[in-house]
Amino acid sequence: MNLPQHIQFCIDRLENAGFAAYCVGGCVRDHLLGIAPHDYDLCTAATPEKLKEIFSDFPLVLSGEKHGTVGVVFGKEVLEITTFRTEGTYEDGRHPDWVEFVPNLEEDLARRDFTVNAMAYSPTRGFADPFGGQEDLKNGILRAVGEPELRFTEDALRIARGVRFAVRFHLTPEKETEEAMLRLAPRLKKIAAERVFDELCKLLPLMKEGDLLRFAPILGEIIPELKPTFGYDQRNPHHAHDLYTHIAQVTAAVPPELPLRWAALLHDIGKPATSSIDEKGIAHYHGHAQVSAEMAAEVLRRLKAPTQLREQVVALIDQHMTYPIPDKKWLRRRLSRLGEDTLKQLLALQQADTGSKGTANEGDWDYFRQIHNILTEILAENACLQIRDLAVNGHDLMSLGIQGRAIGQTLNCLLEAVIDEQLPNEKTALLAAVNHLQSEEMI
Ligand code: ATP
Ligand code: MG
């Protein structure tokens, strides 16, 4: 394993001071998979006290000291070095209740979640893999270290991590590990919401349709609002799939950006609650976009998602049934209201939604192509879409004697007129229009 210079430097320094030191966890796993590790973690026999002495000439991050971790700062990077330790349960869902420093590597590896994450490497001491992680990796198996039931009871977040590693590295959970993951998934509700939310944010962009179907029962424990969609018959000729299969397809089909993936996952959760059956036995879901949006807001609030993300997701879901009219003025208005990024995200969601009904046809794709073409045209024209794009500003209006709230109102009127092509975006024309409105005493 070829180590970056600063990692080698730290290992040498620790070894020269008389302490065993290894790279451990994700970086060893990634190396075996032929993936460049995105960061390195070290573990060592040196206690935090010793680490502080050994690296006293470096800036240190000591927030994890109680748990055995000292961060050594190299430029922009903080290298975490952790004393060999065992740990207790995670009562608060965030931190182990206790940690105990131990003299050897094997005990440290035994506290780790999965065999593929429980390997270590040292340039002088070699490769340590007491739980067969390398073999599991080769065979595509995700296996808990030790007794799965016990390990997921200690920290249920490991269940969600397990899903993430299985999806990311195409691993199949070994039978006992999988059974324990499913059985103990309800415990994820007790884990600190931020930790679960972070985990889902890492997981969602990686998921394909098959992953979303395979791990549905676990997702359903984290987001119970999904459960009524499992196997739900949509009883509508426009939908060939059960509701959750459709949700899984849309989620996998949108680009792997967080607002879109979240919006796709939650976009139809309001359907079961809004269904009505007509005289022909066909189901309709009037207002389901708004109900889904409200439910999504609740889910994301509960998971303590950042406000900005929550608002983006809720807006996308709320609007997902408002399909654009292929008309330049209409689209310009929409662009003005939503902004380019949101409108493009909404289109991506609608396209995935249409494509995942199982009944889409060439006409649907023509429609989306047409919308994209018009949008490209509008953007290329550098159209006036915001008040700040207008050829007049508040000062211009004040010099005509307009005051207070009337300034904003007039600017909004002008913007609408320009967007609708009733006025050109030129200063003289806009000021003339304002004069006209004044003479008619409309402002
Ligand atoms: P990534 O590439 O996503 O960073 P990683 O394996 O490095 O993957 P980290 O969350 O950075 O994951 O954790 C580093 C190591 O710490 C893991 O490889 C694992 O050995 C151990 N670990 C992390 N979280 C837990 C946990 N909740 N329970 C047990 N061991 C854990
Ligand atoms: Mg890591």
Image (cartoon, rainbow, N blue to C red):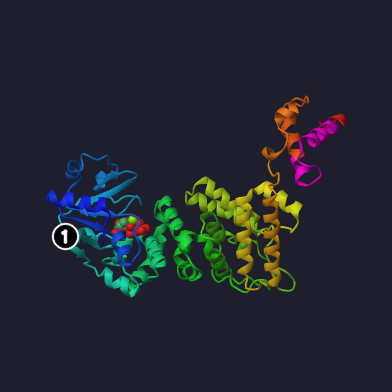
The amino acid sitting under disc 1 is Thr
In the rendered image, is residue 156 in sight? no
Q: Nearer the viewer, residue 255 or 155?
A: 255
**Could you say which quadrant of the image residue 203 lies in?**
bottom left
Q: Quadrant of ligand 1?
A: bottom left
Q: Which residue is mark 1?
A: 124
- Left or right, residue 296 beside residue 190: right
38 left or right, relative to 357: left
Residue at image position (33%, 59%) is: 37
Q: Is residue 249 above or below residue 13?
A: below
Residue stretch rendered in magenta on the structure: 415-437
Horizontal side of 196 relative to 37 (left or right) equals: right
Residue 365 drawn at (x, y percent): 67, 68
User: How many numbered circles are shown?
Assistant: 1
- The image quarter containing residue 265 is bottom right
Instruction: Let me know if residue 217 appears in the view.
Output: yes
Quadrant position of the N terminus in the picture: bottom left
